[in-house]
Image (cartoon, rainbow, N blue to C red):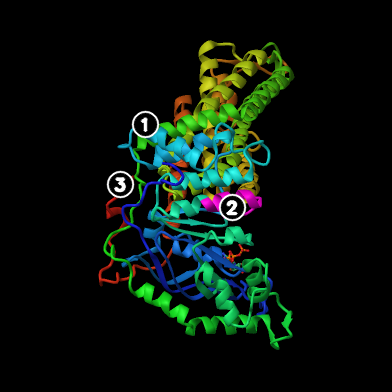
């Protein structure tokens, strides 16, 4: 696909929207709370007010307006990306009435803030879009060819093998990252593409080149809509059409070439050699509170209201209304986009490979875990060195202490480390799942698959070092059982961490809640309070402590068959000591291990359900209902739509 010769779309689509209203509830600070704990009264804040317009097929349209005018909100509503709030109005693709969800599934959307895994290279990020969104029926060779085409089209060849990067990992420039995000969307060849500030943070030349690419793309029949701030006049005139928003209402929509003439007719002539975009921003859209237009004797808000009502009555607005009412001939055709779901195994294998690469390219995390395991194990080994050769109360205390530490350390460290990793991965998941890359199950099970080896290797290493340095019973079978229990303790911590990261949307909240949850569970694990002597009203808590089951298993494993001696050299069977500690529930070691496994399974299921409910909520995020088509029919569900091959 050459830059000029991008494949034409089989059916181009005009996007029309009628009476779009979007509002949110915000705290009403003018109403005083009855008491400090009373909930704050809410009021409705209208962000978009009866916005109607048309984005013509095969045209590049700019949505412009002062900061806070509602540009992003309009794009989000039209593309079905709103999160919360109340939305009403109608959206049409040609004559087909569309729901927000149908728009989300069928349109491309480039967000203002791109979320791309920092360790992927430019080529890999674009290839991800090809592998996971072009369907299994497209050959690997074809997908690779399309990726290389995109790299050339967006002028990314120089950065093709550079990592995307993050604030802590050197990577591609801001402009290159933006172009990667555009390439990912262009690869699925959507008939309609929304871009939220594609030029923000770019120098004027790069901004010009990005918009030129979009212009070429629109020329192939696509409908491209981008919000933009302060374009240079060169960039401004690359747009075919412009929609000016002011205070959530339309002030002008039409060809860019007519903007100067339109505002001239309203008493705002553009000075010679002045950038028309700057002129409209400075003299027309300026909504700064308190400033006053002395020449016309009105405030900025009054001027905006006046120009908005002029627009409603203007002949230009009537032309737009006519275009809305008379969609192009391809009226009954449904949206076409090459996005097609891939099989679970394709997604799972891709994500497994990507996560493995991610771990290799980010070796600091693995090294830190290894260092932590080795250093801590050596310290504990030295602290309890050769306990097996000692007798009396102190030896017994040490033996119990080291077993308790083994369990607590595995549960705590696994919980804390996966909690922050998973909470960050969730952000990338939310964006990629929303864009149709993969399913929740593929993400979830690949994540578990990738983390599993470290949940086995590290506890095994720690258990091995500590067991043989401390001495314990020095039996191979007991050593192996101890390793299994430590691995299970690590897995319970891992599943607990994933659950907390899934339940709480904010990482700081999850981090604050974790100790509040873990400390009581530790308290009831059998060392600090005798399990048989817990007051009845708290007794149930011990059954919920994964640490208790791990500790009980380790104690039974170590003390069964062991004779311990007190200070006077009086022997006591170890099993009696274990019973005295309150572990007299009649369960054998394997039963305690089984309960640990049960914890893992239940926590993993709960995490999955928590993520599932978030995903479901996101899928219902736009409440724009199904609009009746201009031919009188309601559009069928997006899932039932035929995916049309739009390659030239
Ligand atoms: N979820 C929300 N909660 C509270 N206020 C919101 C929310 N979404 C939007 N707003 C408010 O709605 C108004 C319009 O926001 P929007 O992001 O659409 O404006 P914008 O024109 O894109 O602004 P900018 O150019 O600064 O990005 C702003 O005043 C914003 O604070």
Instruction: Give the image location of residue 88, x and y in percent.
Output: 43, 72
Alpha carbon of mark 2 to alpha carbon of mark 3: how far?
30 Å
Image quadrant assignment for residue 533: top right
Query: Quick check: can you spot residue 595?
Result: no
In this rendering, position of residue 460 left or right of residue 35: left
Determine which quarter of the picture holds residue 16: bottom left
Instruction: Say which label, 2 or 3, has the lower sequence index.
Output: 2
Name the residue that disc number 1 marks: 140
Q: Which mark is residue 645?
A: 3
In the picture, the disc for residue 35 is: none
Residue 72 visible in the current orientation: yes
The magenta segment is 198-212
Residue at 58% in and 24% down: 459
Residue matched to label 2: 208
Please name whichever residue, 167 or 631, is drawn nearer the observer in this view of the structure. Answer: 631
What is the C-alpha distance between the residues marked 1 and 2?
Answer: 33 Å
Q: What is the x, y in percent for residue 150?
A: 47, 40
């Amino acid at each position: 696909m050459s830059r000029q010769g991008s494949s034409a779309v089989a059916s181009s689509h005009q996007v029309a929207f009628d009476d779009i209203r979007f509002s949110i509830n915000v705290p009403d600070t003018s109403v005083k709370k009855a008491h400090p704990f009373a909930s704050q009264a809410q009021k409705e804040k209208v962000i978009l007010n009866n916005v109607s317009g048309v984005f013509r097929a095969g045209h590049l349209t700019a949505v412009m307006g002062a900061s806070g005018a509602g540009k992003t909100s309009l794009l989000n509503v039209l593309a079905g990306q709103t999160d919360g709030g109340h939305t009403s109005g109608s959206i049409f693709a040609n004559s087909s009435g569309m729901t927000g969800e149908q728009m989300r599934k069928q349109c491309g959307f480039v967000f203002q803030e791109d979320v791309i895994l920092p360790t992927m290279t430019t080529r890999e990020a674009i290839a991800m879009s090809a592998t996971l969104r072009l369907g299994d029926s497209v050959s690997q060779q074809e997908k690779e060819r399309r990726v290389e085409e995109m790299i050339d089209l967006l002028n990314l060849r120089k950065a093709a093998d550079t990592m995307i990067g993050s604030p802590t990992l050197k990577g591609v420039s801001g402009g290159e990252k933006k172009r990667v995000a555009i390439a990912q969307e262009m690869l699925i060849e959507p008939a309609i593409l929304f871009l939220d500030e594609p030029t923000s943070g770019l120098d004027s030349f790069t901004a010009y080149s990005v918009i030129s690419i979009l212009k070429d793309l629109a020329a192939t029949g696509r409908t491209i809509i981008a919000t933009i701030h302060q374009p240079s006049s060169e960039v401004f005139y690359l747009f075919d059409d412009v929609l000016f928003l002011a205070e959530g209402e339309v002030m002008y929509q039409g060809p860019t070439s007519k903007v100067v003439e339109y505002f001239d007719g309203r008493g705002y002539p553009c000075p010679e050699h002045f950038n028309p975009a700057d002129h409209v921003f400075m003299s027309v859209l300026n909504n700064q509170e308190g400033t006053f237009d002395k020449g016309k004797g009105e405030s900025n808000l009054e001027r905006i209201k006046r120009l908005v009502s002029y627009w409603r009555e203007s002949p230009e607005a009537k032309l737009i209304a006519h275009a809305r009412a008379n969609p192009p001939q391809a009226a009954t055709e449904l949206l076409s986009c090459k996005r097609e779901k891939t099989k679970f195994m394709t997604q799972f294998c891709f994500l497994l490979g990507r996560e493995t690469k991610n771990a290799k390219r980010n070796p600091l995390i693995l090294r830190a875990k290894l260092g932590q395991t080795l250093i801590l194990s050596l310290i504990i080994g030295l602290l309890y060195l050769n306990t097996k050769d000692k007798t009396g109360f102190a030896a017994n205390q040490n033996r119990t202490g080291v077993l308790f530490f083994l369990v607590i350390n595995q549960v705590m460290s696994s919980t804390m480390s996966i909690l922050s990793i998973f909470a960050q991965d969730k952000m990338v998941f939310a964006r990629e799942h929303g864009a149709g890359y993969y399913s929740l199950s593929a993400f979830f099970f690949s994540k578990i698959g990738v983390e599993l080896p470290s949940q086995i290797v590290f506890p095994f290493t720690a258990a091995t070092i500590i067991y043989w340095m401390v001495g314990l019973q020095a039996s191979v079978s007991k050593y192996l059982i101890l390793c299994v229990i430590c691995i299970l303790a690590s897995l319970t911590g891992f599943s607990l961490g994933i659950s907390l990261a899934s339940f709480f949307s904010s990482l700081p909240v999850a981090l604050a809640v974790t100790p509040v949850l873990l400390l009581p569970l530790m308290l009831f694990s059998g060392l600090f309070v005798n399990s048989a002597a817990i007051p009845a009203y708290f007794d149930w808590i011990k059954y919920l402590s994964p640490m208790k089951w791990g500790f009980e298993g380790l104690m039974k494993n170590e003390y069964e068959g062991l004779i311990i001696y007190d200070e006077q050299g009086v022997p006591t069977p170890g099993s009696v000591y274990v019973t005295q500690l309150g572990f007299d529930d009649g369960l054998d070691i394997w039963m305690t291990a089984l309960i640990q496994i049960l914890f893992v399974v239940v926590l993993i299921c709960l995490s999955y359900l928590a993520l599932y409910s978030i995903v479901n909520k996101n899928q219902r995020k736009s409440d724009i209902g199904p609009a009746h088509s201009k031919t009188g029919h309601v559009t069928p569900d997006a899932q039932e739509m035929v995916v049309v091959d739009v390659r030239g």
